[in-house]
């Protein structure tokens, strides 16, 4: 089982930035792909981005150009840099081990207008 812990959420104003972190343990980090997802009230959990073990990113069209996924294999950590945040970006953000399906507990992001 892979353990994932998100951090970095908070309250920001529209147009500002946040950087989320996902600390991973219980697996060879460089061998797993990590995904970021968002849950907003009344909606299904939305996929945002994935990064492969080799560092290749893939983005949902809704966040491409504003969000950047990255990883530091030496620190067993994946990141999601979120720029030009909008109120619609408000939600709980989760990271996931793509291979095992394990989820973190989530971190709240709130963007005020």
Image: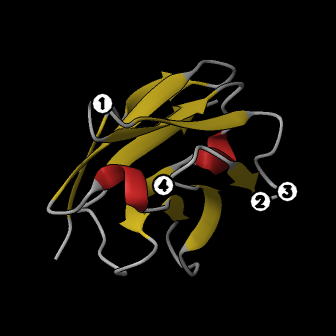
Residue 60's label in the rendered image is 2
Residue ID for mark 4? 91
What x and y, as percent, mark residue 105? 23, 62
Mark-to-mark CA distance, 2 and 4: 16 Å
Q: Residue at x 37, y 37 (%)?
A: 73
Residue ID for mark 1? 74
Q: Are dots 3 and 1 in contact, CB under 8 Å?
A: no
User: Within 10 Å of the Cα at label 3, are there few (<14), some (14-19), or many (20+) other Cα atoms?
Assistant: few
- Lower position in the chain sequence, tag 2 or tag 4: 2
Q: Residue at x 76, y 47 (%)?
A: 63
Mark-to-mark CA distance, 3 and 4: 18 Å
SS at badge 1: loop
Q: Residue at x 73, y 55 (%)?
A: 58
Residue ID for mark 3? 61
Mark-to-mark CA distance, 2 and 3: 4 Å
- Lower position in the chain sequence, tag 3 or tag 4: 3
SS at badge 2: loop
Mark-to-mark CA distance, 3 and 1: 29 Å
- Is 1 displayed left or right of 95 in the figure? left
Q: Residue at x 53, y 75 (%)?
A: 45
Quarter of the picture containing the C terminus is top right
User: Within 10 Å of the Cα at label 4, are there few (<14), some (14-19), or many (20+) other Cα atoms?
Assistant: many
Name the residue nearer the viewer: 104 or 30: 30
User: Within 10 Å of the Cα at label 2, are there few (<14), some (14-19), or many (20+) other Cα atoms?
Assistant: few
Q: Nearer the viewer, mark 3 or mark 1?
A: 1
């Amino acid at each position: 089982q892979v353990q994932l812990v998100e951090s970095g959420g908070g309250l920001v104003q529209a147009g500002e930035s946040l950087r989320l972190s996902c600390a991973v343990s219980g697996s060879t980090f460089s061998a797993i792909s990590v995904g970021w997802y968002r849950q907003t009230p009344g909606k299904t959990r939305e996929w945002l981005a994935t990064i492969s073990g080799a560092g290749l990113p893939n983005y949902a069209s809704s966040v491409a150009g504003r969000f950047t996924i990255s990883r530091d294999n030496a620190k067993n950590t994946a990141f999601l840099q979120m720029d030009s945040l909008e109120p619609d970006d408000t939600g709980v953000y989760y990271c996931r081990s793509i291979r095992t399906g394990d989820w973190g507990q989530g971190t709240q992001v709130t963007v005020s207008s």
